Amino acid sequence: MDNSFFNRLLPKEKKFFPLLKKISDVLIATSEIMIDCVQCENHQSVVEYYKKIKEKEHEGDFLSNKVFDELNKTFITPFDREDIHDLANKLDDVVDGINSCAKRIMLYNPKKLPEDASKLAKLINKSAISIGKAIAELDVLKKKPAMIKEYCRELHDIEHEADDVYENFIINLFENEKDGIEIIKLKEIVSELEKITDIEEHVGKIIQTIIVKYS
């Protein structure tokens, strides 16, 4: 018997879609807190924002682990197990990246974060929203592949925009900042922000792989 044909006749578990959607909701909420964190000039408030982000990071870990547990218990999945695993894992990586950056801001306590940090935080949030929209459509992938592809293109475009912001930041940093310690602090923090948009674009690539296989 053709097992692939047989598998298509079996009901597929739908529980992965709400779990992935919950992880994307955590990502969006975390990215919103990050905007407030980079714009805050009061260190004690930064500490409080970091605590909120840390709570979201724990929530994201719980949900991603739930996905992994369900993969081990589920016979037929809506997409390849590897794709579901990679998607949940990479979403969690984005939240982890935001948490790591907020921790650096708290520990390094720079004198003032540049406007480019705020721009990058807003781009991270913009990408998070696009990811959320794409994941919300995965359960109707065959009906709306073009829409999901468009969300993935947005992630690609946002990542390029973030590259431009980061390059502009580096130019201004070495031209205008005279304090060597502040240069190190700011460069590492803003670099972490830019890397988060790279991870978000990678989420889009995983979703595009799913589209190619199943649309």
Image (spheres, rainbow, N blue to C red):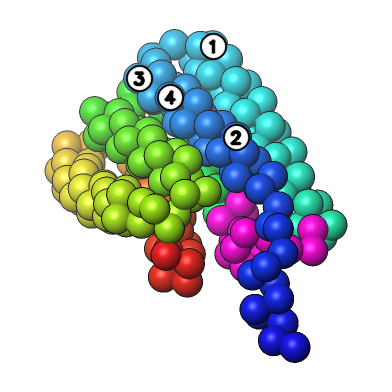
Decide: marks 4, 3 in contact (CB < 8 A)? no
Decide: marks 2, 3 in contact (CB < 8 A)? no
Measuring from the top left, give residue 160's x and y in whole percent.
23, 54
Under tag 2, what secondary structure? helix
Q: Earlier in the sequence, mark 2 or mark 1?
A: 2
Give the residue number, with chain letter if any, for mark 3: 39
Asked whether, in this view, residue 67 is left or right of residue 167, the answer is right
Give the residue number, with chain letter if any, for mark 1: 44
Give the residue number, with chain letter if any, for mark 4: 32
Q: CA distance from mark 4 to mark 3?
A: 11 Å
Give whichever of 160, 80 is nearer the camera. Answer: 80
160 to 210, vertically: above or below:
above
Which of discs 2 and 3 lies nearer the camera? The answer is 2
Res. 73 image quadrant: bottom right
Question: At label 2, which amino acid type do we have?
Answer: Lys
Decide: marks 4, 1 in contact (CB < 8 A)? no
Q: Earlier in the sequence, mark 3 or mark 1?
A: 3
In magenta, the rendered stretch is: 74-89
Quarter of the image for the N terminus: give it.
bottom right
Residue 15 visible to the viewer = yes
Q: CA distance from mark 3 to mark 1?
A: 13 Å
Measuring from the top left, give residue 151's x and y in whole percent.
32, 48
Q: CA distance from mark 2 to mark 4?
A: 15 Å
Question: At label 3, which amino acid type do we have?
Answer: Gln
Q: CA distance from mark 2 to mark 1?
A: 30 Å
Give the residue number, with chain letter if any, for mark 2: 22
- Graded by Cα atoms within 10 Å as few (under 14), some (14 to 19) or many (20 or more), the crowding at tag 4 reads some
Residue at point 17%, 41% (across, down): 172
Which of discs 4 and 3 lies nearer the camera? The answer is 4
- Graded by Cα atoms within 10 Å as few (under 14), some (14 to 19) or many (20 or more), the crowding at tag 1 reads few
